[in-house]
Image (spheres, rainbow, N blue to C red):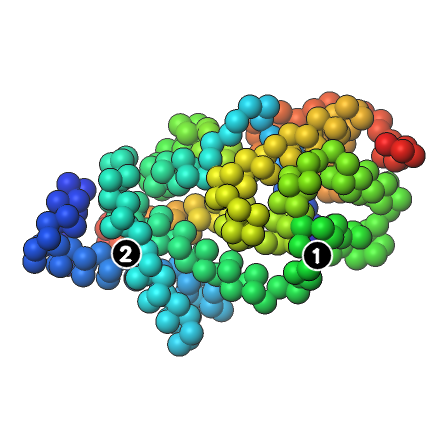
Amino acid sequence: MKQKEFARLLDTIFAAKSGEEMSCTDYFDSLPRYAELEASGVDAAAALPEVRHHMHQCPECEEVYLGLLALVRAEKMADRA
Amino acid sequence: MRQRSNAEWLTALRAGDQNQADALADLRELVLGAIIKFLARNETPGGSSLDHDLHQMAEDCAQEAIILIQSKLEQFRGESKFTTWAYSIAVRVTLGELRRRRWQKAAVDRARLGEDMPIWPTDAPEPERSLERQQAWALLARLIENSLTPLQRKALVAHAFQGMPLDLVAEWLGGNRNSIYKLIHDARKRLKAALLSKGITHQDIIATFDSPRRETYLSDDGKTFQSQSVSYTVESGS
């Protein structure tokens, strides 16, 4: 495990909320909107804080977001060209 | 390729006629193109073109993604472009396959899955293991051993320390991705409570293992805790 991965694990322990958290399924349902907001320059984390929280707690789900965001941004640039 | 609105995509993909065949062909082109871009960006040096194996993987993932997209049309909520929703499924399928392949090659003793805590959690060099860090790790390892249910411990150790993907943990332990995520969430809650009960805050433990001034999601969110003098000494019998 890399140092930063271990630090992330420690972060997720202390970021754990006392109640239930958004599931991966609900996260994926909201992710396309989140990525489009972010690619449009909107503060997606402020608009959808539960999605942002899940992203922090679940590195695998964050990886999907980063891949999707790159695609959405590339498509936006292609549309402008 | 024909431009379609969200409604036009949904109508065409359900049409059962030539419109559906045309829409499926366009969707396949878009999804395959997205997967190839994703793999080129993340799996090749300098974003170069895919080798035969990766290209075959892209084709297989595109096929799986198209089947999933068709089966989930009712779940599309219309909150984004249809193609963005389709890309999210494509990326998810592709990352799932990449993780599965990496796990197959991982040097983890399958007989000890969910059991073996590492002697030291990171690949940091030996001089980095100060006494304080060793004590902090010993305490955390002890809490993982004693504060969690056997199932929580298995899931956390397999996923976080042995690198087993969540979907595969779900296949291994039974359940689905959501139930395993919840299991690990419950494990985190227990560890957080146990650490706080010993007077150990997020800031303390990050300062021990990492830079205390590092920006984190927790500090973004205003949830950092007051630092204090802290001892990681593990009490006997605790």
Residue B112 badge: 1
- Same subunit: marks 2 and 1: yes
Amino acid carrying label 2: it is: Ile
Q: Is residue B214 above or below residue B49?
A: above
Number of other residues with Cα within 10 Å of mark 1, as a class: few under 14, some 14 to 19, many 20 or more: few
Work out which residue is located at the far bottom of the displayed protein and give it: B52
- In the image, A20: left or right of B76? right
Mark 2 neighbour class, 10 Å CA radius: few under 14, some 14 to 19, many 20 or more: some
Distance of mark 2 from mark 1, alpha carbons? 37 Å
On the image, the x and y values in percent for residue B163 come to 61, 54
Query: Could you tell me which chain the residue with mark 1 belongs to?
Result: B
**Residue identified by numbered label 2:** B66
Could you tell me the amino acid type at mark 1?
A: Arg
- Mark toward the viewer: 2 or 1: 1
Which residue does the image show at 40% across and 76% down from the upper left?
B52
Q: Specify the quadrant of the image occupied by residue A45.
A: top left
Q: Can you give x and y, in whole percent of width and height, for residue B193 in the image?
A: 71, 26
Residue B218: percent from left, percent from top: 61, 31
For marks 2 and 1 on the same chain, the one whose residue lies earlier in the sequence: 2
Disc 1, SS: helix
Does any portion of residue B4 appear in the rendered image? Answer: no
Question: Which of the two residues, B25 or B132, is positioned nearer the viewer here?
Answer: B25
